[in-house]
Image (spheres, rainbow, N blue to C red):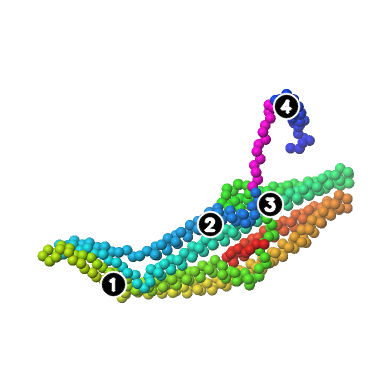
Amino acid sequence: MNETLNPLRPKGAAMRRVAVILGFALHLAGASPPFAQTPPPQSASPAPLTFQAALDLALQNNAGLAAAKRAKAIREAAIISAKQLPNPEFSFEITRDTPHETVGLGLPFELGGKRARRIDLAREEQSLADLEVRGALQSLRGELRRSFYGLLAAEERVRLADEVAAIARRVREAAQARFDEGIAPRLDVLEAELGLARASADLELERSNRIAAAAALNAVLNRPPGQPVAVSGDLSSGPPPLDAARAWELAAAANLEIVSLHREIAIEGRRADLLRAERIPTPILQGGAVLNAPGEFNSGAFAGLSVEIPLFSRNRGEIAQSTATTRQLEAQLDAALRSVESLIFGATAKLRALRGQVASYAQTLVPTAISIESLAEESYKLGRTPLLTVLEAQRTLRDVRREYLQALADFQSAVAELEEIIGEPIQDK
């Protein structure tokens, strides 16, 4: 409420003066003021997070990454299963014929390296779990970069809107002063007040956007959306310039799609080896005792060998299926290599253009817009420029600085996009 229009202010001021006098008198008398209150403790604001500190928190707390790591235990259990030896077979028979009881034990012996090939296949499949963790980690880093620098940009937009509101306030005061002196029309005051109202509305909107950006970062950090969070850093910070040839060299060795297809081809090779090894029969060595043959013997031993004859089923269909799958994966790999090469070319070109745009705004456009607005404001105070020129310069400055912040946000998003294509982080400056 405007202080000049508040009729309760004199009474409140008088009451405060009475309270001060009474408290001082009681203090001299050795007593404490009856209504003295302990000021409430101030809540400490959170320490600003750097990008690396936020990344460390995300690696510890992100739920999606934790779920991906749990999938690795499933693959490890498959290796334990592959290492298991075949169970022995125990048999016991009672018949009316002689001998009346038979006890036997059969021991399978796997030949042809079946067990070793099962283990190799399970270990090769485990590498897919490692890739799932890498994929979750890379996705997390991309989300964190966008949300972290998105919050940093939101805070800069709040500062910008606050500065624009301060400029609009100065322009309004200058228009009011010139109107009071009789050298400016009432229209200037109204236009200045309209500009101030717009600037104030923009400031409230940017504050709300800052709250939404903080909630997005808290989501990546697996924290409550309303938890206070502060960030520190430079929106223009990023990796050193990277040409398409070097980026393609990194992507060929680390891109998740390419590496995953290589792993799947290797898995099919291991599976085909196991199918061929399973063609070799698994002999079962049998031994035991025969008991209770009246008139002949009380007990006796026997031994035997049983072998499955691979006459009809020789895994021909399974091996043909594995071979066809391998050829399909190789075709997918060729397509992925071409696609990633094109993506790398476009992403590096985009990042290079955004880097130049950011430099242009920082070195030329923003300083020029600031100078124009300052000169227009000073010229209006001296009566040399109409108010519309000042308002236009003010809007131009606001738009240029907004475009600069958007260019910085686009630059960080392009860095995240290139890192996701390459498959590993690019070292920041």
Give the mark, 1 or 4, whose residue is nearer the N terminus.
4
Kindly indicate whether the residue at mark 1 contacts the one at mark 3 (C-beta within 8 angstroms): no
Front disc: 2 or 1:
1
Give SS at disc 3.
Answer: helix
Residue type at mark 3 is Glu
What residue is rendered at 55% in x and 53% in y?
61
Give the alpha-carbon distance from disc 3 to disc 2, as whole Å. Answer: 28 Å
Q: Which residue is mark 4?
A: 27
Q: Residues within 10 Å of mark 2 (few under 14, many from 20)?
A: many
Q: Residues within 10 Å of mark 4 (few under 14, many from 20)?
A: few
Q: Residues within 10 Å of mark 3 (few under 14, many from 20)?
A: many
Give the mark, 2 or 1, whose residue is nearer the N terminus.
2
Q: Which residue is mark 3?
A: 155
Q: Which residue is mark 1?
A: 307
Give SS at disc 4.
Answer: helix
Magenta-drawn segment: 32-46
Residue type at mark 1 is Val
Could you tell whether 191 is left or right of 236 in the image? right
Q: Is residue 35 magenta?
A: yes
Please tell me the numbered disc located at residue 65.
2
Could you tell whether 361 is left or right of 42 in the image? right
Q: Is residue 123 visible?
A: yes
